Amino acid sequence: MHVRLIAVGDKQPAWVVTAFDDYCLRFPHQWKFTLNSVATARRNKGELSTVAKEAEGAKILAKLKPADCVVALDESGKQESSKSLAVMLDEWQTVGADLVFVIGGPDGLSPNVLQRANRIWSLSKLTLPHGLARALFAEQLYRAYSMLSGHPYHRE
C-alpha cells in the first residue's frame, strides 16, 4: 500500500512544515508516503470562488488513478475517533489499494473531487487553517499506525 496526500497550497509556514515532516518521518517505509502539492488557484476580485475551486479540483483529479482509494478531508465529512481511523487504516492495508488523502484550498474541495472520494473525513467541526489541517492529518495518521503496531504513542 502506498499513501499519498494531495494538498492545495504549496507555501506553508515553517511550523507547519516542521510538524508535518516530523510525523511523516515516523510513517512506515513500506507506505512510500508522498506529498503532492497543488498550487492555489488565483482568486480574482468579483469572481465566484467556485471558479478557483473547480480549477484546483481539476488539478487534483488529474493526479488520481482509477484504482486509488480516495479520502477527501472536508468539513462535510464524518468525524472519526482515533480508534475508528485505526480500524479503517487496518482495512485499507488489508485490501492493499493505494490510499490518497486530499485537502482542498481556501474554499474547500470541488464537488467533482468530493464525488470521486471513496470516503469523506472531517477532522473537526471547527474551521481549521489548511496548514493546521495538514499537520493534524499527519499526526492522526501516525497515531492510527502506532495503535495498529502496538506502539505506546497512543494512551487511553
Image: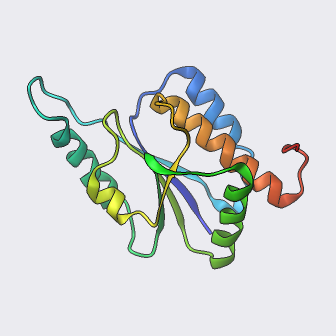
119 or 5, nearer to the observer:
119
Report the residue at 34% width, 32% height from top: 106
The residue positioned farthest toward the left in the image shown: 46
136 or 81, nearer to the observer:
81
Report the residue at 63% width, 78% height from top: 95
Is 67 on the left or on the right of 33, as rendered?
left
Which quadrant of the rendered structure holds the C terminus? Answer: top right
Report the residue at 15% width, 42% height from top: 51
Is 103 on the left or on the right of 28, as rendered?
left
Q: Position of residue 24 (x, y in %)?
A: 66, 44
Q: Position of residue 123 (x, y in %)?
A: 56, 42
Report the residue at 33% width, 53% height from top: 60
29 or 153, nearer to the observer:
153
Which of the 4 quarters of the picture holds residue 43?
top left
Is 48 on the left or on the right of 119, as rendered?
left
Q: How is the image coloured?
A: rainbow
* Residue 24 in view (yes/no): no
56 over 148 or under it: above or below: above
Which quadrant of the rendered structure holds the N terminus? Answer: bottom right
148 or 128, nearer to the observer:
128
Q: Position of residue 132 (x, y in %)?
A: 54, 30
- Count every numbered label the image shows and give the total: 0
Q: Position of residue 28 (x, y in %)?
A: 74, 56
* Residue 100 in view (yes/no): yes
